[in-house]
Amino acid sequence: PITTWGPWIAPTATVFGNPISLVPVIIHLLIAVAIVLIYSEPRTQDFNTDCVKMTRGYLQIVVPFIIGGFVTMQVAKWQTKRGSYGKLVGRTRDALTKVGAYVRSRSPAEAETERSARKTACRFFCLALELAVLKARNAMDNKELALPFLKEMELCTDQEWDALISGDRHTTVFFWLQSHFRDCFNSGLLNPQEYHILLETVSNVRGVANDLIDNLPNGIPYVYAQMIGFVVRLYMMLVSLEVGFQTQIDRAAFQEEIGR
């Protein structure tokens, strides 16, 4: 459900999602209003307005480059993350297809064995995918959140969860997959070529999962983000001052014109 804090705004997944983000805007507007209502020194109004305009003009030259680079970097990182997720899903589906095609017994008597082997391999691939996504959401080691979800999807048991290595659970599942395919090869469910293809498939899926996860800690440097925030707030402050001073000048000129 979409929750709103205004009758005309649906803030879900928008800049309006947190009303606190509008506090600086309101403060700057109040500054402009305060200048109009309080400041009344006519001899320095033009000088103050020109100083503010000049400072804002210099800053306006720099702001588009700084903010443009910041936005470009953020969009590029978002696209990279979405692309990595798409690759992970695609490689996992490719792996499931190969498991269904390759893991076959040569004897009708082993039909149940091959079915169980395929089911286990497919479950492990799906489990690795979900764990990688959970880690991307910083929830992989949250047992209260992750385990009920995985159990509901019939992907993981309590014993398997306890056997997963904390902080790197998806890699543990890839190890299980390679061990499982080795057992399938020893049992005659895979020939040498199929065995090596599936091992390579496991490595490919693991690589894409790590690409998705590696994008998370490599965000925009905090100092750079602070600089962006400072420049934007400074620019808004100058605009507020300029609006206040200019409005006061126009107000005085309007009152003088009426007095005539």
Image: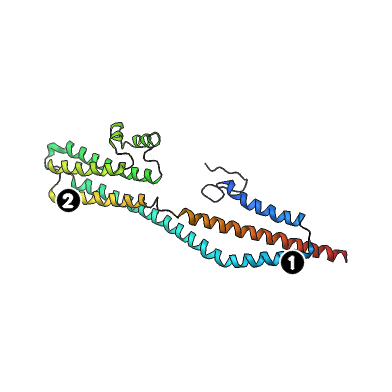
Mark 2 highlights which residue?
196
Q: Residue at x 21, y 44 (%)?
A: 178
Secondary-structure class at tag 2: helix
Mark 1 highlights which residue?
46
Check whether the beta carbons of the residues at disc 1 and disc 2 lie within 8 A of each other.
no
Q: Is residue 238 left or right of residue 92?
A: right
Residue 85 drawn at (x, y percent): 36, 51
Residue 180, quarter of the rendered image: top left
**Label 1 vs label 2, nearer the camera:** 1
Q: Residue at x 60, y 50 (%)?
A: 22
Residue 226 drawn at (x, y percent): 52, 54
Mark nearer the N terminus (1 vs 2)? 1
Q: Is residue 246 left or right of residue 21?
A: right
Q: Is residue 3 left or right of residue 148?
A: right
Residue 78, quarter of the rendered image: bottom left
Q: Amino acid at mark 2?
A: His
Q: Within 10 angstroms of label 2, few (less than 14), some, or many (20 or more) residues?
A: some
Q: Amino acid at mark 1?
A: Asp
Q: Residue at x 60, y 44 (%)?
A: 5
Residue 135 drawn at (x, y percent): 37, 44
Q: Nearer the viewer, residue 103 or 230?
A: 230
Quadrant in which the C terminus is drawn = bottom right
